[in-house]
Amino acid sequence: MKQVLTFITFLIFSTSIHAKDSTIFTPVSDLFLAVSNFDHAKMRAAVDDSFLLLEHGEVWTIDDFVNVVKPADYIQTNYFSVINSRVEGDVAFINYWNKANIKNTERSIDIYWLESVVVSKVGDKWLLSQMHSTRLPQDEIPKGVTFIKQQI
């Protein structure tokens, strides 16, 4: 009986940690869903006032990012694979693989990035403060990575 209680306590503790950690990825997911939907207001809602995106050798503000996201005739589906994450008070650091499938009536392509983010707790909400994104060459698909489709 004691072993069962210990196991249940461990399970509850593990589940609560996982649930807590999963909320830190919410602004990343929200941002990419907003990009997929060409929703500039929701893109802005996922970031804090100091947000910077280090995108493949360039420095972008949220305004720069919003300006490149224009309605188009394709569907973008996002996939993620979190490498690791760490929370220190009101700041979290997340490293992950990102895959986007971009599809229109003529073709479908997959694009991959290695990314890291800093998220900050503002009030009761996690927001993106910084994102570093390195696009991988088309022929360099990450090996051994399991991607999880973004929930819509």
Image: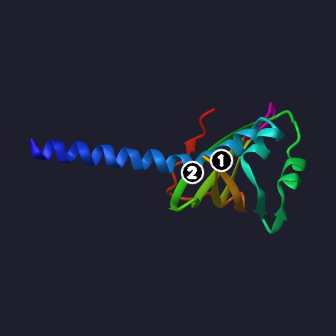
Instruction: Name which quarter of the figure residue 40 lies in.
Output: top right
Q: Is residue 144 magenta?
A: no
- In front here: 119 or 66? 119
Q: Secondary structure at mark 2?
A: helix
Q: Which mark is residue 90?
A: none
* Type of amino acid at the residue the image marks with label 1: Pro
Q: Main secondary structure of the magenta part?
A: loop
Spatial CA span between label 2 and label 1 = 7 Å
Q: Which mark is residue 27?
A: 1
- Residue 27 spot, x, y in % from top left: 65, 47
Residue 35 appears left or right of 14: right
* Type of amino acid at the residue the image marks with label 2: Ile
Residue at the image point whose x is 47% and y is 48% from the top: 20
| As drawn, 84 above or below 70 | below
Q: Is residue 104 magenta?
A: yes
- In front here: 125 or 51? 125
| As drawn, 52 above or below 8 | below
| Residue 135 visible in the picture | no
- Residue 53 spot, x, y in % from top left: 77, 60
- Residue 125 spot, x, y in % from top left: 63, 46
Labels 2 & 1 near each other (Cβ < 8 A): yes
The quadrant of the picture occupied by the C terminus is top right
Q: Secondary structure at mark 1?
A: helix
| As drawn, 6 above or below 52 | above
- In front here: 131 or 90? 90
Give the magenta-colored segment's residue range.
Answer: 102-107
> How busy is the neighbourhood of tag 2: few (under 14 within 10 Å), some, or many (20 plus)?
many
User: How are the colours assigned in the image?
Assistant: rainbow
Residue at the image point whose x is 43% and y is 48% from the top: 18
Instruction: Name which quarter of the figure residue 138 lies in.
Output: bottom right
Q: Which mark is residue 24?
A: 2
